[in-house]
Amino acid sequence: MQTVVSFIIIFGTLVFVHELGHLIFAKRAGILCREFAIGFGPKVFSFTKNETVYTIRLLPIGGFVRMAGEDVEAVEIKPGYRVGLKFDRDGKVNKIILNNKDKYRDIKVIEVEEVDLEHKLYVKGFEDEEDQTLQTFEVHPKAVVVQDGVEMQIAPYDRQFSSKTLGQRTMAIFAGPMMNFVLAIVIFMVMAAIQGVVTDEAKLGKLTEDGAAISAGLKANDEVQAINGSEVSSWQDVQQEIQKHPGKEIEFVVEREGKTLEIPVTPKEVERDGKMLGVIGVYPPTEKSITGVLAYGFTETYFWTKQIFTLLGDLITGQFDIDMLSGPVGIYVSTEEVAKSGLIYLLKWAGVLSINLGIMNLLPIPALDGGRLAFFAVEAVRGKPLDKQKEGMVHFIGFALLMLLMLVVTWNDIQRFFL
């Protein structure tokens, strides 16, 4: 149960923050965002607030923000349709009812002759078949079209994604991956605030209860001056001297509360990467400071960003096998293992996953944010956008291929962990 909760919280947070970036910058640009969704497939839960439907969907494989003008609008009104019009106090149409009109009171039913819900916002029509007087009705910019009892707000052109400047559109798309990097920085800062920031002092940090250090009489915060006659000036020096003497007694010279003490310690033997190393059960020294916490968030994010790009390079050059990729199942299993190690390791895992999600979405792959940004780059060079239908087809094919890859990776995960 702990694993399930950890997975839901981590995965849900990563997707939520990513999509929140899209939502915030899209709304700042004045784009009508129809839906903010976590997951794909059938709706499990939904509510509406400030023009946007917020939903949780069944399949936990991502999320999306549906912006006006990006998808084919589900409702289209053509000349010849008989529709019901409901008006606000100012006399503007605030509801256009397509069917089941008998369920609504105080509506005017007309036969549509002409309609424009994108630019001039009006609907023209005849109220009576015998009286062919053409009437024009002004439509409110936030009017809704009602079909089968379901309301959908109209999207005037200035509320559509494509009406915005290249900079606004670019920021609305880039904001998703950007927020994943911001989240990683915050997570690593929280880690540093909890456990402290590792320093390179020749000093002992926290001691493990079953280690050789605590048994020999060493204490946390002891300042190490020398080990086996060799002077040390950093934690790295201390660590190297300990590792060089597995199973052999070594003498620590430490300063504690103004006194110099000589304490013999015998490091335990452990095997790492085929080599026998000495360990005494001591953590590196840490400190807690505002500047240290802030710096750690950025340096750790930079470190893991480089690591992930290195792995991507191996994938491109063929040194990284597809079987090493993991989908939701693999992430779930890894989360289970990490959760056993405690909160700090779980936070670190969430930070690394957030960076990974940000980088993957920035790759110039159709259907991903990076693919869309690549099209914007071409638009910037050409001075005009590419054909919308052709771009849509490229993204559709890219999405289909990504779903296929997801199925392959998920099947590999199931075989590796459960079969």
Image (cartoon, rainbow, N blue to C red):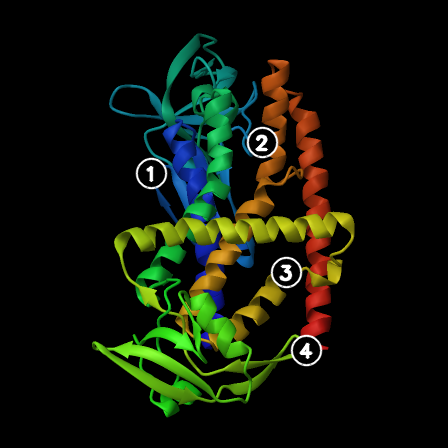
According to the picture, the residue beneath numbered tag 3 turns out to be 327
Relative vertical location of residue 340 with respect to residue 72 in this rendering, above or below:
below
* Cα separation between marks 1 and 4: 60 Å
Q: Secondary structure at mark 1?
A: loop
Q: What residue occupies the far right of the structure in this picture?
A: 318
According to the picture, the residue beneath numbered tag 4 turns out to be 274
Q: Residues within 10 Å of mark 4 (few under 14, many from 20)?
A: few
Amino acid at dot 3: Gly
Name the N-terminal-most of marks 2 and 4. 4
Amino acid at dot 4: Gly
Residue 148 seen in the figure: no
Q: What residue occupies the far front of the structure in this picture?
A: 229
* Marks 2, 4: nearer the viewer: 4
Name the N-terminal-most of marks 3 and 4. 4
* Cα separation between marks 2 and 3: 24 Å
According to the picture, the residue beneath numbered tag 2 turns out to be 373
* Cα separation between marks 3 and 4: 31 Å
